[in-house]
Amino acid sequence: MVAKKVVVLGGGTGTYTVLSGLKNYPLDITAVVTMADSGGSAKKERDEFGILPVSDVRKALLALSEENGREGLLRDLINYRFVEGIGVSGMTFGNLFLVALSHILSSQERAIEEVGKFLKIKGRVLPVTLEETNLVAEYDEGVVAVGEHAIDEPKHDKRLSIRNIYLLPGVKANPKALKAIRQADFIVIGPGDIFTSLLPTLLVGGVSEAVKKSKAKKIFIQNLMNKFGQTNGFTASRYLSEIDKYLGIKFDFVFANNAPLPKDTLRYYATSENSYPIEDDLLEEDGYLIFRKDLLSKKRFKPQEGDNLKRSILRHDSDKLAKALLKVMEE
């Protein structure tokens, strides 16, 4: 039997979670990841090393890697984050490894392929573009933020709504990514921050057109929480309407968690981040099948030592998510 071709679009912990689960099944997996990161080590990679940001690439490679024996130790090494050292504190060994290998091979694309071989990944990881770009957000009252990090951790009033978002300069898609999308049987988008993980991937020139023209079934995985400063008060349907607003992509299936969220975690989000659960107002008459299932991880995630960026502590369970996706793919 020929393995079904699955393309996962996005970046960050959401894409990591999806890939971590799907790799355990007989699927032909391609991760197409955002290259618009500008926070943390990404700024050094861009400004000091002259290459595209690699954090989302590294996470996707780790998600698809083997986790036993020697490969497990190598995986831990790639994920190791320095907590000391002028210039390297906060950076991961994997990011530095990708930087060094890109210079040795004179090709960032080849470096990603070689690290994939080292980690014996199940599938492929492709940058959505091989060109440098910045994410730009326009808010109420004429406020403009340039760079993914400036949008993710805004210094302006977080109550302002994003009115428009785009890439500057506009960039063309990686031809290999477009080919994978065209040949896919299933395209999975989400979970992830819509303005800093999902749209930056879909806004790259040629991507949304390829997704719309692809005969693949399109699947959207809904976030668990809204993010103050980006999606204040968004309902589940608002996420889908935002993607439709920018790209005109219609989904065949939508997955939403229906397990209760831990009260202590909700208090943490409310008091420390002013973030709240997403209201599920999805309706099947909108043209897609809705799967409401327990997709919640029972683990409360803690920041890695040396990591100064805010990370989600409430996440989907990779195994539950993969099983739910596989059921749809098999049917």
Image (spheres, rainbow, N blue to C red):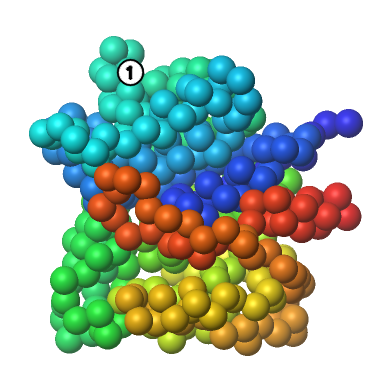
Residue 229 placement (x, y as % from top left)? 31, 76
**Callout 1 environment at 10 Å: few (<14), some (14 to 19), or many (20+)?**
some
Q: Is any atom of residue 173 visible in this view? A: no
Residue 110, x across and y down, in percent: 41, 20
The residue that appears at 19% across and 35% down in the rendered structure is 84
Q: From this viewpoint, which residue is outermost toward the top?
A: 104
> Which corner quadrant holds the N terminus?
top right
x and y, in percent, of residue 57 in the image: 43, 38
Which residue: 50% across, 39% down?
60
Is residue 149 shown left or right of residue 14?
left
Identity of the residue furthest to the left in this view: 86
Residue at the disc numbered 1: 101
Q: Residue furthest front?
A: 264
Relative vertical location of residue 182 with respect to residue 189 in this rendering, above or below: above
Horizontal and vertical percent position of residue 257 = 66, 71
Marks counted in the figure total 1
Amino acid at dot 1: Leu
> Which residue: 43% across, 86% down?
233
Question: Which of these two is toward me, 108 or 225?
Answer: 225
Quadrant occupied by the C terminus: bottom right
Q: Nearer the viewer, residue 140 or 168?
A: 140
- SS for callout 1: helix
Q: Nearer the viewer, residue 185 or 115?
A: 115
Snapshot quadrant of residue 297? bottom right
**Image-based side of 84 in relation to 248, left or right:** left
